[in-house]
Image: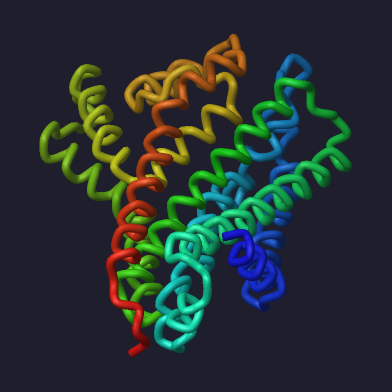
Amino acid sequence: MYAVFRKELADHLSSKRFGILFILVLLAAMFATYLAINNIRGVVNPTTEFVFLKIFTTSGETLPSFLFFLSLFIPIIGIALGFDAINSERTSGNLSRLLSQPIYRDSLINGKFLAGLAVLGIMIASVIALVAGLGLRIVGVPPNSEEVLRLMAFVLISIIYGAFWMALAVLFSVFFDRTATSMLASIALWIFFFFFMSMIAGAIADARVPIDQNSSLEMVTKNFEIQGMIGRISPCTLYGEATSALLTPELGSLNPALMWISTLTAGRMLTPLPFSQSLLLVWPQVVSIIALAAICFAVSYIRFMRREIRSI
């Protein structure tokens, strides 16, 4: 497995695909961070805590925050690293030649997945570190120990989130013989979860509990609870909630109804949560993403171990 891992890691790092994706994500992240830094004066005051974390969550007037850009690009990176992991080797005939060597099937798929996960981790950690360095250089406020812990947890959750999309792409790569089909299936599922899932959740909630300007607080609360329950089917929603709670210590609840009420009454809690409490708050979301990634990889692993390996 180590030989497969090393070879795949070298192929990924030396490929044009990696360079294009890294430059694209880096430019978008730098631009969003620059706009956030220019707007950060409007959201902080002398008593504001965790100023350094505002770099990642503050949005500009025309562009969203760095957190939004990262949630947008991580699935693309994961899909790009996994959509042709198996079927490209199979259609080219390399898979049968590889497995004719003293290489087991499980070593092949495990090595490929771990190599992609390593590249994903390198890319995410590098982009976040560069953005943090840029923010430190311009803002001039160094992060404290708790902010460093929150950023480390943010990097780890982002890698787990990318691992889910890469596992999903590998799953389609095992089930479909053509790389174009597996790529389109992965992108279609990402578009559904990222863009349409929230609209579907809102439509179902409005159908179950219709609300308007004259609706009572109880009906509005129930509407938001239904939206949140359905929206958490999407891993994009789980990742957004987990990272928002980590990078916004003042966020004391992930209940959509309570978050909506909070925006009406002052916005956020006056007392930020400690890191341990924020971690407990996002733990269900993190476990759900890990479970989804494990299920996708387990299904692809079982399918690959039982499938015919002859080239088409």
- Give the quadrant of residue 44: top right
Q: Position of residue 203 (x, y in %)?
A: 19, 45
Q: Relative to 172, is 32 on the left or the right? A: right
Residue 273 versus residue 133 in the image, above or below: above
Q: Hey, which residue is sitting farthest front in the picture?
A: 102
Q: Position of residue 3 (x, y in %)?
A: 63, 65
Residue 211 versus residue 114 in the image, above or below: above
Q: Quadrant of the N terminus?
A: bottom right
- Give the quadrant of residue 86: bottom left
Which one is nearer the viewer's eye here, 186 or 309?
309
Q: Residue sitting at 63 percent across and 51 percent down?
A: 121
Which one is nearer the viewer's eye here, 93 or 54?
93
Residue 226 visible in image:
yes
- Give the quadrant of residue 270: top right
Q: Relative to 97, is 140 on the left or the right? A: right
Q: Relative to 137, is 72 on the left or the right? A: left
Q: Residue sitting at 46 percent across and 21 percent down?
A: 281
Q: Quadrant of the C terminus?
A: bottom left
